[in-house]
Amino acid sequence: MSREVRRVPMDWRHPKRGNGHYIPMFEKDMPHGDWYIMYENVTEGTPLSPVFSSPGELAHWLSENGETVFANHTASYEVWIAIIERGWYMPIGSMQHFRKE
């Protein structure tokens, strides 16, 4: 997988190193909650977005801020919502639904 939705508390702040870079974390090591955040999980996982109260808010932020689903491929709101509802995205097969930036 390359992208996954994690459910976290409203006030979740992913820990950072002294240099400001995120410390990768497996989902099992994180607190769970009712809010939505998108993570990359090529490593153990670092956040790609802020925390949002709904899947729609997260999808809007991801599409409006040009977040990529893989390499330099961005996605529309509709594609991001589908990824969020599924819970994860693995870049295999056709990339026809994505925009190359």
Image: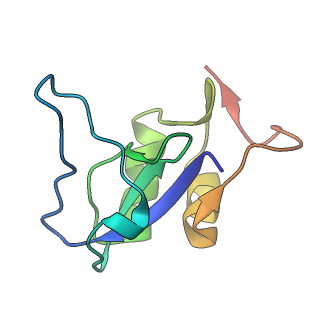
Report x, y in % for residue 68.
55, 34
**At 30% from the left edge and 80% from the top edge, which residue is drawn?**
34
Instruction: Please name the colour scheme applied to the rendered image.
Output: rainbow
Q: In the displayed structure, does residue 96 sit left or right of residue 67?
A: right
Place residue 58 in its image quadrant. Answer: bottom left
Report x, y in % for residue 17.
17, 33
**At 33% from the left edge and 65% from the top edge, which residue is drawn?**
29
Quadrant in which the C terminus is drawn: top right
**At 12% from the left edge and 65% from the top edge, which residue is drawn?**
11
The residue most toward the bottom is 34
Report x, y in % for residue 94.
88, 41
Asked if residue 83 is positioned above or below residue 71 in the image, the reply reads below
Q: Nearer the viewer, residue 82 or 12?
A: 12
Asked if residue 75 is positioned above or below residue 78 in the image, the reply reads above
Report x, y in % for residue 85.
58, 71
Q: In the displayed structure, does residue 98 sit left or right of residue 96?
A: left
**At 27% from the left edge and 79% from the top edge, which residue is drawn?**
33
Asked if residue 26 is positioned above or below residue 48 in the image, the reply reads below
How many labels sit on residues? 0
Q: In the displayed structure, does residue 59 sit left or right of residue 71?
A: left
